[in-house]
Amino acid sequence: MKIDVISIFPAYLDALKLSLVGKAQESGLLDVNVRDLRDWTTDRHRTVDDTPTGGGAGMVMKPDVWGNALDDVLQRESTLVIPTPSGEVFTQALAARLAQRPHLVFACGRYEGIDARVAQHYRAAGIATVEASIGDYVLNGGEVAALVMIEAVARLIPGMVGNPESLVEESHGEAGLLEYPVYTKPVSWRGIEIPAPLLSGHHANIARWRRDRALEKTAAIRPDMLAALRDRGGLSQTDEA
Ligand code: 6GU
């Protein structure tokens, strides 16, 4: 997979050189390029923003500069991802869909956002375009949101995570439940014992205990997820007991 990130603060994306995403780049599974939006400005001051038409606070990013950049970077098979708090919520399902695509282009806006005609234009031109928010809170720009989305997508690329089973059991994965609590040695730490079933060596009992803790935790913290799983027929009689 190829990923381009366009931003006026390319240094924000330095974290992509670290850890899993960095290793994926060394192994050739992933090719990430971070580009400076100002390279596509044409004026002496390298202007990327202007006042909002119709009035209001803040500044809006200019469509002409974004058009220059995206015309250069996008190809027919690219997916344009625009991080914005007004987008659809970025979920594990959206991450999984994006992980199937050959080329992602992240257009990181700052200030009050990018002129709305940019998304409209590339959609009309037949470029798959996704406006996505990482949650109901406000960041100063799309860079940190792009980091979040890239990490979530990159670990779903086949061959990226050492043990594919770790993708199945984890929170928001296929089970549709939050993950059960995990423990390692010592068996007793500061007076707190690891729950006995995990020490039993009885695999069915361990699986049942883990499933019950996942159900309990999901019911308490994310009742919406539990209801959705029930509606999909994902809860057995034992689960409901
Ligand atoms: Cl994608 N951008 C900004 N600026 N704020 C956000 C966000 C994105 N997602 C949640 N808050």
Image: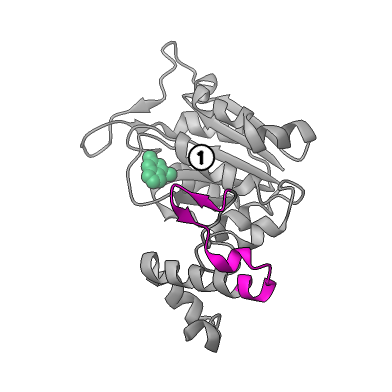
What's the image's color scheme? Answer: one colour
Q: Is residue 193 magenta?
A: yes
Quadrant for ligand 1 reads: top left
Q: Position of residue 199 (x, y in %)?
A: 62, 63
Tag 1 residue = 146
Horizontal and vertical percent position of residue 137: 32, 47
- Residue 20 figure quarter: top right
- At horizontal 43% and vertical 66% (from top left) the residue drawn is 217
Q: Which residues are magenta?
A: 186-207
Query: What x and y, as percent, mark residue 29?
Result: 76, 40
Residue 235 sits above or below residue 131 on the image = below
> For residue 27, which quarter of the picture?
top right
* x and y percentages locating residue 43 in the rendered image: 45, 15
87 w.r.t. 213: above or below: above
Tag 1's secondary structure?
helix
Q: How many marks?
A: 1
Beta carbon at label 1 within 8 Å of ligand 1:
yes
Residue at the spot 54% in from the left edge and 20% down from the top edge: 39
Q: Name which residue type carries label 1.
A: Ala
Identify whether 149 is placed above or below 177.
above
Q: Is residue 136 visible?
A: yes
Residue nearest the viewer, comparing 70 with 184: 184
In what quadrant of the picture does the N terminus appear?
A: top right
**Is residue 116 among the parts visible in the rendering?**
no
Residue plotted at (44% across, 47% down)? 190
Pick the front one: 167 or 186? 186
